[in-house]
Amino acid sequence: KSRYCAFCKYLVQKQGKDVEKVKQRLAEIANYVDKFYRALNIRVALVGLEVWSDADKCPITQDPFNTLHEFLDWRKVKLLPQKPHDNAQLISGVYFQGTTIGMAPIMSMCTVEQSGGIVMDHSENPLGAAVTLAHELGHNFGMNHDTPERGCGCRMTADRGGCIMTPSTGYPFPTVFSTCSKKDLAASLEKGVGMCLYNMPEVKVLYGGQKCGNGYVEEGEECDCGEPEECMNPCCNATTCTLKGDAVCAHGQCCENCMLKPAGTMCRESSNSCDLPEFCTGASPHCPANVYLHDGHSCQDVEGYCYNGICQTHEQQCITLWGPGAKPAPGICFERVNSAGDPYGNCGKDSKGSFAKCEARDAKCGKIQCQGGANRPVIGTNAVSIETNIPLQEGGRILCRGTHVYLGDDMPDPGLVLAGTKCGDGMVCLNRQCQNVSVFGVHECSGKCNGRGVCNNKKNCHCEAHWAPPFCEKTGFGGSIDSGPMRLAVLLFLNLKASWKKVSKWRQILDENEDKMQQRVTKNMTEKVTKCVTKTRQKRN
C-alpha cells in the first residue's frame, strides 16, 4: 500500500541568491526525493517551503549536533502547531564541521520530537542535496548505512553512483535504494514507525500547483494515476484524469474493480498492540486516516506504554541493539553507568554539546543497559560493546552491557533510551526525564468512553463492537468517528443473507403455490370447458 510523507523544507539562503530561484531549486530537490521513494511505494509530498533570507529562526552553526537539536526543538515548539506535517528538513548553506553533510535521528519518523533532519546544500547540482536529503530521510525511516559487512545488494555499481544509504557518496550521485534499505524500512514499518503516513496529504497545500499526472487527485480531477506511460489503473484515463466508463472510483483501499467497497469492510488491520484498525465508510474510496491508541495506554501486558503508536520497552530496544535473547539489565546498571556523564553513560547532551549526567530518577532514560544477546551489537557499524562489572553488596558482580555505536557523522547516538519508554510503574521517559504517565492525559480521555471503548490519538473514543461513537453510550456498530464503523458490513451481509433465505423460501412457496394453482386452473378450465361443451351439445340436440 502507498504511504505518504508530507514534509516541509526550510532553507537558509546563500548570499546573493534570488529567493524565487532558491524556491525553484528546492522544489526540484523535492521532486527528486519523491522520485527516489516512489520505488519503495512511498510518496514524498512537499507541503511547505520557506526561505530564511533575513534571519535564522533557530540557531544554525557549524556544529551539526547542536544545529539539529535547535532545529528539531524549533519544529516541535513553533512549526508543528502552525503547519501540520510528517517530517521537516532544514537545508543550509552553512558548512558543517568535519565530513558531515547531513544528520538525522534514526527511526524517528512521525515523532513530535525528532521527525526531521538537517542537510548541507553542498553541490551546484540540486541532485546532490536531494540525495543527501533522501539519505537523512532514510535514517528517519529506520534505514542504516549500507556497509560491506551487511552484504547489501545494489543494482547500481559504485562507478554508477551505488545506493543512497552508503556511508559516503560522491559523483555520480546515487539514485536507488539497496536491498538492506528495503529490509530496514520493512522492519521499521512493522514495528510501527511511520504511523502518520497512511493518510493522503491535503492536495490544496501541495507546493507547486495543480497538474494532471502527478499522482494526486486535485480539484477538477476524478482520478490521477500518474503520467500516461506509467499509469496501470484500469479505472482512470491518465490523459484527462477522469474515470473511465461506469467506474465510480479509481484509487484507494476502499475501491475494488472501480466500485466502492461496502461500509464496514476492514481496510487497514492493526499493525501492533498500540494500533487500531480502520474500516471503509461506504462513501469514500479511501481508507480513513490511520489512528492508534492515545499515548500512555499500557501495552504488552503492562510492560510498556504506547507512544506514537508504538509499544516502547527497554526489552525491545535491547533486542534491536543486541539481537534475540537480549533483555534490559537491572536498575543498578542504569544508575551507576548513566551517572558518569561521559560518552558511555549519559542522558544525552546539553545545550552546550556536553554529555549530561543522569539524575538517579532519570537513569532509565539515558544510555540503555542490557544483558544477553549477541557478542557485539547487531546494529550499524563500528559498534563497541561497553561492559561494566558492578559489585553487589550481597557479594558477586553484575555485568551491564551498554553500546557506543558509531553510525557515521549524520546520526545521533542510537544507544539512548527512546522517548515514550516505561521507566517505572506509571512513569515514562520524555526529554531524558522519567515523568509521570499522567502527562499524556490518557485516563481523562478514556473516562468519556463509558468503559466500553478506548481513547485514540485524536482524543476520540474507539468503541467496542456493539456500541456507537462518539461516547460508546448507545448501541451501534463500534469503531470511532475517525476509523469508520466496525460491524456494519457484517450486519448487512447477515441481513442480506437472511433476506435471501426469505426470498428463496418465498420463491419456493410461490413455486409450490403456482403449481397447485396451475393444477386448479387447469382442472377448473377443464370442468368449465366440459360443461360448456355439454351445454352446446344439448342445445344442438
Image (spheres, helix red, strand yellow):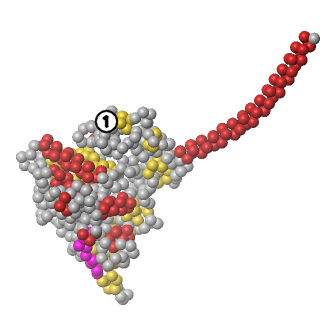
Residue 329 seen in the current view: no
Of residues 530 and 14, the one drawn nearer to the viewer in this rendering: 530
Is 454 positioned to the left or the right of 43 in the image?
right
- Residue at position x 36%, y 71% in the image: 319
**Residue 382 in magenta stretch:** yes
Percent across and percent down for residue 298 are: 43, 62
The residue at the point 32 percent across, 51 percent down is 42
Where does the image place residue 335, in percent across and percent down from the top left?
A: 31, 76
Kind of element beneath mark 1: loop
Tell me the quadrant of the picture where the C terminus can be found: top right
Q: Residue furthest right?
A: 541
**Disc 1 packing (10 Å; few <14; some 14–19; many ≥20):** some
- Taking the magenta stretch, the answer to whether it contains residue 215 is no
Extreme residue toward the top, this view: 540
Task: Report x, y in % for residue 467.
Answer: 53, 48
Q: The disc labelled 1 sits on which kind of residue?
A: Thr
Estimate the x, y position of residue 460 in percent, counting from the top left: 43, 49
- What residue is pinned by disc 1? 239
Q: Which residues are magenta?
A: 380-388
